[in-house]
Amino acid sequence: MSDLYRMPSLGSDMESATLIEWCKQPGERLAKDDVIAVVETQKGAIEIEVFHDAVMGKPLIEVGETVPVGAAMAELEGIGDGIEQAPSPPVEPPAPSGRRRASPAARRLAEARGIGLERLRGSGPEGAIRLEDVQRAVQAQAPKAPLPPDSKGTGLGMAAMRQAIAAAMSRSKREIPHYYLSHDIDLTRATQWLGAHNAELPPDRRILMAALFIKAVALTLRKFPELNGFDRDGQFEPSKAIHVGSATAIRGGGLVAPAIHDADQLELGPLMDKLRDLVARVRRGGLRASELSDPTVTVSSLGERGVDRLYGVIYPPQVAIVGFGTPELRPRVVEGEITPRTLVTATLAADHRHSDGHRGGLFLAKLAARLQEPETL
């Protein structure tokens, strides 16, 4: 049995990508998570993986060709011949609200390309909209005017990246009812613990405060699942896994937030190793598709830029983003006396459809408690 490998969506700010390399040749056996190709997006070169075991079949696009999200890239053979096939997405039943029937894949592509389902004629059962229907609408869209070349000469198309990010953030602010909270967290014990922990380690093995932030957020989310997951057509889908997207600046401009998978289960040392690796690959280009499409929440910090506090914009379809400012000495009343303490302002931006200020406040309080017990992280 054969199947088609389609261009995956790597985020709500991605519309298309350009094939720059096939990593597998026809006849090669593919295992789940094998890298099949490298594509160029506004965020740079991304390795894309297969989602189930198969055998590489005929490529359907050539190197240098740009195709939209959801477009067929290659045939996959051997599906069902002792190799398990990923189940086809079902067509949704009619919703009580009367919205158009459509498969989940069709909805995701339509959302990514800004196509209203009410405009489309469905070819599925009882007029349901299938992925192919949305793809035809994508191909019928008028091509956009070419963007000016990037003046910085980075090769990553920074102007295109900024436009894509701006479009995603505009949609987020327009469609997601954000609420914002902030809380000052005492990091004195965490700073002291970190200094003692790193004292005997070489520089390339030391743990940064950013790793403590990520681990503390991940552990806290175990008690607040409504902040960890995705909004799908107004319905919340909680995620059992906690994949923290770490917002990282790209040289020359732009931002990307690849996932640190299962961050709540990692010790601080391995978590720091993964963080270093992600930052290095963001700088040179070499992220994998799953690292961009998997984050269940985002953590962002501008502390190294001297920013006191950061109020983030939720990256759809996620429902929360946590921000950290610069840890700094500030006067604090402790046991009735004013004393210098190392404090950081943590912020939460969350989707009011799926959580509220009460739960958000409890989340920040629990996050503060965890960071005040760094030895437990």
Image: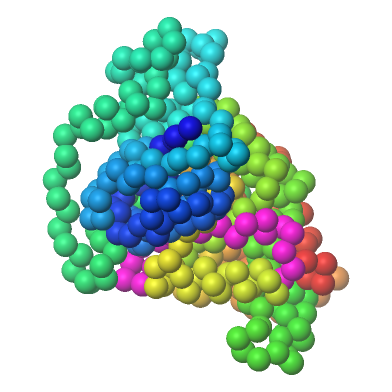
| Quadrant housing residue 123 | top left
Q: Is residue 338 left or right of residue 246?
A: right
**Colouring scheme, one of rainbow, by chain, secondary structure, one colour:** rainbow
- Residue 82 higher or lower than 18, as above or below: above
Query: How far from the left and from the top, in percent, is residue 78?
Result: 50, 40
Considering only vertical position in the picture, is 45 above or below 174? below
How many marks are shown on the rendered structure?
Answer: 0
47 left or right of 324 in image: left
Asked whether residue 245 is drawn in magenta, I would say no
Q: Residue at x 55, y 10 (%)?
A: 96
Q: Residue at x 56, y 36 (%)?
A: 81
Residue plotted at (51% across, 44% down): 54
What x and y, as percent, mark residue 53? 55, 46
Q: Which residues are magenta?
A: 249-268
Q: Which residue is the extreme one toward the top?
A: 126
State yes or no: residue 256 in magenta. yes
Front-lying residue, 168 or 285: 285
Reply above or below: 285 against 41.
below
Pick out the residue farthest to the right: 335
Whether residue 192 can be seen here: no
Residue 274 position, x and y percent, is 60, 69
Q: Residue at x 61, y 63 (%)?
A: 345
Q: Determine whether, in the image, residue 25 is placed left or right of residue 103.
A: left
Image x and y of residue 32, in percent: 56, 49
In the image, 359 versus 245, the foreground residue is: 245
> In this picture, is 351 found above or below 270?
above
Horizontal side of 325 relative to 360 (left or right) equals left
Of the 4 image quadrants, the one containing the C terminus is bottom right
Of the pair 231 and 305, the residue shown nearer to us = 231
Is residue 70 in view? Answer: yes
